[in-house]
Amino acid sequence: MSRLVGSLAVYPARALVAWYLLLVLAGTGLLMLPLCRQPDLAAISLGDALFMATSAACVTGLVVRDVAEFSLAGQVVLLLLIQLGGIGIMTLATLFLVSIIGHQTLRHLAAAQQAVGSDLQADLRVLLPGVVRVALTLEVIGFVTLLIARWGDGPAVEIAWWALFHAVSAFCNSGLTLAPDNLQPWASQSLVTMPIALLLIFGGLGYPVLVDLFTNVRHRWPFFGWRDLSFHSRLMITASLILLLLGAAMFLLIERDAAMADLGLGQASVAALFESATARTAGFSVVSTGGLSTLTLFMLALLMFIGAGPSSTAGGIKVTTVSALFLYGLSRLRGRHQAAAFGHGIPGRAVAVATVVLIVGVALVTVATGLILFFEDSRLPYAETGPLFIEVLFETVSAFATVGLSTGITRDLSEPSRMIIVMMMFIGRIGPLALVVLLTPREHGPDIKYPEGDLQIG
């Protein structure tokens, strides 16, 4: 056992895979218990339990069974999977190891860097409890806000459970809801949708940004300023705001007279803002995704693929990846060799890592989409499959980015296709970068340098 624990501490990427795999397997076993399903429903199959456990633990939100089909015990299991998957079982495990040993080593710091994006000067005994406190604080605030917003809509116990489930699911960017029609019944109630949207945004910023914000507010308020934040925090907040507003504007422009025709301009604007926020983080929706246009689905797929921040509860290739590549491309177009923002240059190593993450993300989505299309319509002509391609692409990106939005084809997929979605959710949760680290062999000796050859590009 000590050898196993030591191995996990030495190789954080392996630890990330191991812990999430154990979490998924444990959740699968629990969800199959008769106690976890409604008494009048048939037994939950292994495939369905595995899918739902993976969706919850990897905070995705795609479903093959409605959450309402599970008993209160089953819903509690799903909520625990969401919480442990969102905060990060690696965070809790590293905190546990440090608490036992009483001091931190480079191995523990490396594990924490994978879990919460800390640097090698961080004090884990301060950082990791701070991460948990920040997460629980925001969830409690969200719970109280949602409880007040929906107070009087039904029995107090049911409303309290609804508020708790959705507060945790929102901050952890899960997208699992207790109602089959998601949040569509509250599309016109901004007191319900806006707190959830804010929880999505905060959960998607990433733990480094949240800790930076909370630390500055706590120690420098009211003299806290924009320049007091780290470069990473400023870039994340700025890029996230741009993506949020751009996505909302596009959604409103395309769907104002279509999917949102029955909403007033103010309500439609709020709904568009909500959909833009949820597309990069979670599978909540106030508008039926299956009723959106192909252009809107394509735009949402791009937002989902980008995702949110590193070390956050969301997936995707991450906002910083796209920001680094965009700034680098912009600098090269201007004849400069270094990408920069806010008076800080972006290291070439960061651009190289961003390039690898982008390539891996595109490759994974491409292969998964091709495989699902092969299993679903390999022998059917295009005229008979209709919009299946965009639906499969949307579903695959949603799984990879751990978002959970779906056009409604999840339940209709064959078992092989469902297993591909399960693998994409799992890979998306550990992250493309962790996957690269996991599969990259250790370096042995100096790199071999070859003479450069002429290559025409573009």
Image (spheres, rainbow, N blue to C red):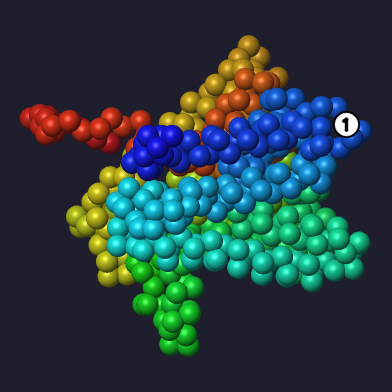
Is disc 1 placed on a helix, strand or loop?
Answer: loop
Q: Position of residue 119 (x, y in %)?
A: 33, 59
Q: Which amino acid type corresponds to the residue marked 1 in the rendered image?
A: Leu
Q: Position of residue 289 (x, y in %)?
A: 71, 44
What is the residue that sits farthest to the bottom in this orientation? 222
What residue appears at the point 86 percent right and 37 percent down from the top-left corner? 38
Quadrant in the picture for residue 138? bottom right
What residue appears at the point 69 percent right and 60 percent down from the top-left corner? 167
68 left or right, relative to 297: right
Residue 15 makes an appearance in the image: yes
What is the residue that sits farthest to the left in this orientation? 451
What residue appears at the point 48 percent right and 35 percent down from the top-left corner? 18
Q: Position of residue 336 (x, y in %)?
A: 20, 57
Quadrant in the picture for residue 334? bottom left
Tell me the crowding category of disc 1: few under 14, some 14 to 19, or many 20 or more residues within 10 angstroms, Cα based.
few
The one nearer the camera, 143 or 34, is 34
Identify the residue under disc 1: 41
Q: Quadrant of the C terminus?
A: top left
29 left or right, relative to 88: right
Answer above or below: position of 86 versus 219. Answer: above
What residue appears at the point 86 percent right and 58 percent down from the top-left corner? 158
19 left or right, relative to 259: left
Instruction: Give the mark count.
Output: 1
